[in-house]
Image (cartoon, rainbow, N blue to C red):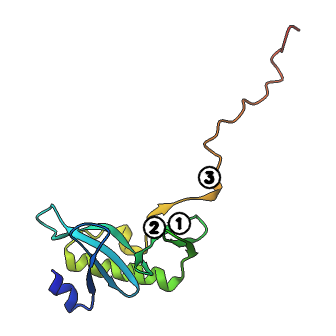
Amino acid sequence: MLDILRAHSFEVAPFAGVQGSLLVSKHGAAAVLVPSQQPDAPAAFAVHPGALVRGEVARLLDRGYQKFIKTSQFELPATAAQLHAIHTFTEELKLLTGATSLYNESLGTTSDLYRYDRLKGREAAQPAPARPWELAGGH
């Protein structure tokens, strides 16, 4: 599989973060692969595909109004070129490694995290609404 990836212009290098893993990159996107436990696919994702930023595979964060590239040190708005690169990389890598390609993922780039700001505070308990038709306190 490594020879096939290299033949298709993927850069393959050992990854220090996970034992026995490889950092596979192309088009400014990357993923970390490990040997798969399933016989039908030779590799599995230890770190899902994302933009490659300073040697780190960034996660794609969706805030409802925009997607962001999130690393351990910072968070930046994702550009259309980055989203296209991640999508192209993911589809090509799944095809070459024999991983399952889902229909909804083939339509566009999917995010790792969804954090919609309009939902903040919604989980807090709301006070009971006033009921003016009920008598209160002794009358």
Label 1 or label 2, whichever comes before in sequence order: 1
Q: Residues within 10 Å of mark 1 (few under 14, many from 20)?
A: some
Which image quarter is the N terminus in?
bottom left
Circles 2 and 3: CB atoms closer than 8 Å: no
Label 2 or label 3, whichever comes before in sequence order: 2
Report which residue position mark 2 lands on: 111
Q: Position of residue 42 (x, y in %)?
A: 15, 71
Q: Residue at x 86, y 7 (%)?
A: 138
Circles 1 and 2: CB atoms closer than 8 Å: yes
Q: Is residue 72 above or below residue 9?
A: above
Q: Position of residue 102 (x, y in %)?
A: 31, 67
Report which residue position mark 3 lands on: 119
**20 and 44: which is toward the camera:** 20
Measured Cα–Cα span from mark 2 to mark 3: 17 Å
Say what amino acid the circle numbered 1 marks. Answer: Asp
Secondary element under disc 1, as helix, strand or loop, is: strand
Quadrant housing residue 20 = bottom left
Which image quarter is the C terminus in?
top right
Report which residue position mark 1 lands on: 62
Say what amino acid the circle numbered 2 marks. Answer: Ser
Q: Residue at x 54, y 78 (%)?
A: 78
Q: Give the label on residue 10, or none.
A: none
**87 and 2: which is toward the camera:** 2
Q: Is residue 105 left or right of residue 18?
A: right
Q: Is residue 4 above or below residue 15?
A: below
Q: Is residue 51 left or right of residue 97?
A: right
Label 3 or label 1, whichever comes before in sequence order: 1
**102 and 85: which is toward the camera:** 85
